[in-house]
Image (cartoon, helix red, strand yellow):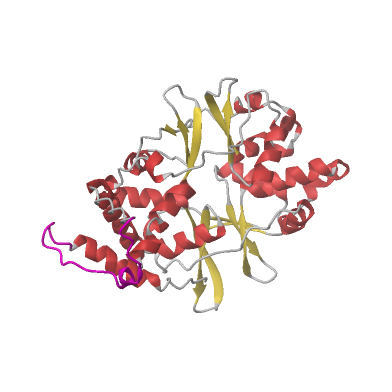
Amino acid sequence: MAQDASHQTPTADRDSSLQSDCNAIRDARPAGHEAHFVQPSSYLRPTRLSHPMTPARPERAIDRDEQQGLCAIRNFLKVRNSYDVLPLSFRLIIFDTSLSVKESLNILIQNGIVSAPLWDSKSSTFAGLLTTSDYINVIQYYFQNPAALDKIDQFRLDNLREVEKALGVAPPETISIDPERPLYEACRYMLESRARRIPLVSNDSQTDRSLVVSVVTQYRILKFVAVNVSETQKLRKPLREIQLGTYDDIATASMDTPVIDVIHILVNRSISSIPILNSEGVVYNVFEAVDVITLIKGGVYDDLSLTVGEALKKRSPDFPGIYTCSLDDGLDTIFDTIRKSRVHRLVVVDENFRLRGVLTLSDVLRYILLEGENDETL
């Protein structure tokens, strides 16, 4: 069945402390008028005249601006709910778990989407979210069990958990959130579960049954912030200083790498993209998990033997390309990019376009929610 169209997490106790600290930053008096406070813990430190304590580095304007920007974003997320993120008009496609993998794949491609909520019609309950990772797991499973490949067209969505068990990969958490809960809670849920999207599921008071409203993605949330929170322009500290992104042990491939090898890496690393480099480490492209969907449309799996270079030629002509940034960029410029373009990750490069790292939307979301949180609640 494909049809058009609660889960609650209590806000952490420390949020009230964070809120007061954020308000305190906005209400701070000009320099020179602050009261002098001594932390009680300072009385417990032994005095060593031979090794005097190094004086704390004075707070810089860029540090203060960064903290004000983060607090403004968190305050915004706490007073908005997931309904606020949704467009005025949208289409929702839900898959019944009895649907075959081939049928679901065709529907995704026809509608230009990469994920869909699942519904168990037998129990009338929300059954999770179908994503490109599920299709990649199916490919991996049949690669390891070639004798069963002729039965792949009969494989149904309610068998996906069996595939994950056979591969030894952890099944995704069946998370959701009531759309009336604060957007901040939805973000925390996504970080805790490592999910890039979260279904909005409410309860029908008349039937006392779950109702799938929509799906909210990290990109949609961050764009909502970029458009509505002007303080994102205060996040000027460069990536190299805040150490945001992944810079070590990055999985890469070349244009000659077989697609099936890239799929193995995606599964083993639990990642959604791989930078494509030449022999000198220059970034040529990025192979994404969604590229696999294009290769297996129509239920034909022969294209998985292609090289990455051949596979990327099959991309849609309107593919937006890859987005890059440097270690000297701050999140202010990253949010500008998110505001203007549909970006899901940025490749960090040097002046010669050689790979330095990868910055994902998960990295950005984690930073704006968690950076300095422990210090703020002391």
> Residue 90's x, y, as percent?
45, 53
> Residue 219's x, y, as percent?
44, 48
Where is 155 relative to 257, above or below? below
Q: Which residue is drawn at 33% across and 66% down?
A: 18
Q: Residue at x 78, y 46 (%)?
A: 141
Q: Could you tell whether 130 is left or right of 205 in the image?
A: right
Residue situated in front as seen by the camera: 177 or 284 = 284
Q: Is residue 36 magenta?
A: yes
Residue situated in front as seen by the camera: 142 or 347 = 347
Q: Please tell me how many numbered marks the rendered image carries.
A: 0
> Residue 241's x, y, as percent?
38, 42
The magenta segment is: 28-50
> Residue 91's x, y, as percent?
49, 53
Image quadrant holding the N terminus, namely: bottom right
* Residue most extreme to the front: 50
Where is 176 relative to 134, above or below? below
Report the predominant secondary structure element of the magenta stretch: loop
Image quadrant holding the C terminus, namely: bottom left
Q: Could you tell whether 72 is left or right of 2 in the image?
A: left
Where is 50 relative to 178, above or below? above
Q: Could you tell whether 205 is left or right of 242 in the image?
A: right
- Is residue 297 among what the camera can see? no
Q: Is residue 200 magenta?
A: no
Q: Which residue is drawn at 11% across and 62% down?
A: 33
Query: Residue 30 occupies which quadrant of the picture?
Result: bottom left
- Is residue 341 among what the camera can see? yes
Residue situated in front as seen by the camera: 29 or 139 = 29
